[in-house]
Amino acid sequence: MKYELSGGNTCPLATVTLDKGESIKVENGAMVYMKDVTIAGKMNSSKKGLGGLLGAIGRSLTSGESMFITQATGDADGGQIGVAPAIPGKIVKLSVGKQQYCLNTGAFLASDDTVSYKMKSQSFSKAAFGGTGGFYVMQTEGEGDMLVNAFGDLVELTVTSDKPISIDNEHVIAWDANLDYDIKVASGMFGFTSGEGLVNHFTGDGKVLIQTRNLHSLAEALQPFIVEKNSRQLQE
């Protein structure tokens, strides 16, 4: 994938350059602008026909992702499409192939057409407590480049067999598919004693990408001001 990032780390824009006939997949609604590029909505499934429809519905129900994904195709050499995530934060490239990844919900931004993801089943305990798609988690397949995004900055952490790591569930973006993980309570009764909630406990050897900000924490911080504003409007 030929791309350039502009706009800094806070509010970046990824501009992808396409040859004639070259296609990429883009998160639904992420397109900012395009030049000599045609876009089309496709079912979020590698299958066609009824099987593709059922597969797209299954992905949507199990992972929270959209049933549809945008396919952008170059109409001429040098075609360009600008894509950006819905939230402010860094964009990075994952090289998919020899190394496959698991993705948290909302991390995907764009990828080569040769890259896709499948839904990998989780244990009941992970599904009951996790925030990565219920009974399923997204795992990449194929070979090529994938762009992922975060809220805030992206930091790469190293996990080794002798040094496992626990990460707040809301900060995990992507991790090497060969890593094992369990979802646990940080401390006390659901973290009440420390103020923390659920953590992903990673073991094995590999990398984990985390985001430095937590969207749910931001929403909770803003909630009192939103409620107060709505109350004032009702009083008026």
Image: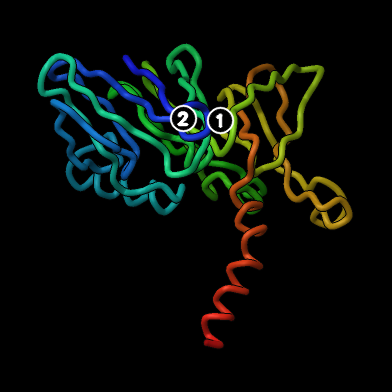
Left or right, 147 with respect to 230, comes to left
Q: Secondary structure at mark 2?
A: strand
179 and 187: which is toward the camera: 187
**Which label is found at residue 174?**
1
Q: Residues within 10 Å of mark 1 (few under 14, many from 20)?
A: many
Q: Tell me what residue is drawn at x 29 percent, y 40 percent.
A: 69
Residue 62 is situated, as x and y percent measured from the top left of the image, at 45, 50
CB contact under 8 Å: marks 1 and 2: yes
74 lies left or right of 177: left
| Quadrant housing residue 97 | top left
Q: Is residue 81 above or below residue 234?
A: above
Q: Pick whichever, 130 or 51, lies toward us.
A: 130
Q: Nearer the viewer, mark 1 or mark 2?
A: 2
Q: Quadrant of the N terminus?
A: top left
> Residue at point 61% right, 44% down?
123
The image position of residue 78, as x and y in percent, is 18, 15
Q: Is residue 68 left or right of residue 191?
A: left
- The kind of residue on which mark 1 rests is Ala
Residue type, numbered disc 2: Val
Residue 207 % position (x, y): 63, 20
Q: Quadrant of residue 7?
A: top left
Q: Residue at x 44, y 18 (%)?
A: 96
Q: Nearer the viewer, residue 4 or 24?
A: 4
